[in-house]
Image: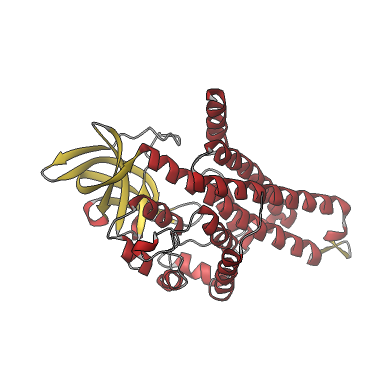
Amino acid sequence: MNFDYNEEQQLLADSVRRYLAKAYDFESRKKIVAGQGWSKDAWAQFAEMGLMGLPVSAEHGGFGGGAVDLMGVMEAFGEALVVEPYLPLVLAARLLKNSPLLSGVVEGKTKLALAHNEKGARFSLDAVKTRASKKGAGWVLDGDKAAVIGAPVADHLVVSARDDSGIALFVVASGKVGLQAFRTMDERLAADVVLRGSEAQRIEGGRKELEEALDVGAALVCAEAVGAMKFTCDTTLEYLKTRKQFGVTIGTFQALQHRMVEMFISLEQARSMACLACSKADTGGDPRAISAAKIKIADAARHVSQEAVQLHGGMGMTEELKISHAFRRLTVLAREFGDADHHLARFSEISAAL
């Protein structure tokens, strides 16, 4: 298996990193988080760079890219701890397929989010209690969705709901729903969504398409976690080279060198699994690979983030250091789209059925 990006993918990832290094440094990020929680300027620049068009088909002005094409972008976003809700837009755009909304998405004018999770679902794909009912020529939705990332700034939501045929997909204007907005532990915008007779339009697809989209989300979260782990390892290594104790830099202590090496080993193992997950997500043919990657990413994220805090000492958990923010992001990413326990059970269930 080839773990290298092709030339176009590498150029895109490099251009995203250059922009983020210049305009999305830690101080800039802190101002964004302290303000509205997302940057309109950064969002417009993402659109200018073509990122919004990556998951959109060419017939709607996009590039028709898959998870492998998005992997480098998500890794760069992970390094910078980007808070803008890009991944929710990617997944919702994937499900919309042929919607006229997609042209606005490509231009950066239309923001989307995916509303699937419900309270008590514990990552179950089928735990959908939201109901869809026919009303005239359209549909209305009744139910509640929990912790929808990006919902406070989304113009439209792609919502999973049950009708008489099973799980179906609908698009709802954000003005038709109730939102209870909050910030997540890792400083992203989210909301609980309240649907009470909310007018909706049914879109093509159902359970199968939803599962494929969530698998793409899990794979791309793996890539984002790799980026966050890379930042964490690089920053911790630099700290060990500069922090002095007992008259020498602490990086000269062999015990700390061994711990640092173990962190980089975890990073590289996670990177390989993220590559595998993204390649399989594009084909939709091996959900076991997605779950295997998520299990490994959860383990590596825990190891790398906790070791980084330990090697920084008490200051590793302070707001002033980006390491503490990376710790929070990695803690959340390890659980997003299913934690290790969920994916271990899923892996076992699929394997038993083979």
In the picture as drawn, the residue positioned furthest to the bottom comes out as 22
Does residue 162 appear in the picture of this structure?
A: yes
Image coords of residue 63 (percent x, y):
44, 63
In the picture as drawn, the residue positioned furthest to the top comes out as 352
Which part of the image, by quadrant, shows the C terminus?
Answer: top right
Quadrant for residue 319, please give it: bottom right
In the displayed structure, 267 sits above or below 63; it is: above
**Lateral position of residue 92 relative to residue 267, left or right:** left
Q: How is the image coloured?
A: secondary structure
In the displayed structure, 118 sits above or below 331; it is: above
Quadrant for residue 165, please give it: top left
Image coords of residue 331 (percent x, y):
57, 47
Does residue 218 appear in the picture of this structure?
A: no
**Lateral position of residue 181 relative to residue 48, left or right:** left
Nearest the eye: 98 or 28? 98
**Lateral position of residue 125 relative to residue 20, left or right:** left
In the picture as drawn, the residue positioned furthest to the left comes out as 136
Image coords of residue 32 (percent x, y):
47, 68
* Residue positioned 70% across, 54% down in the render: 308
Q: What count of labels does the image hold?
A: 0
Image coords of residue 257 (percent x, y):
83, 54
Nearest the eye: 150 or 19? 19
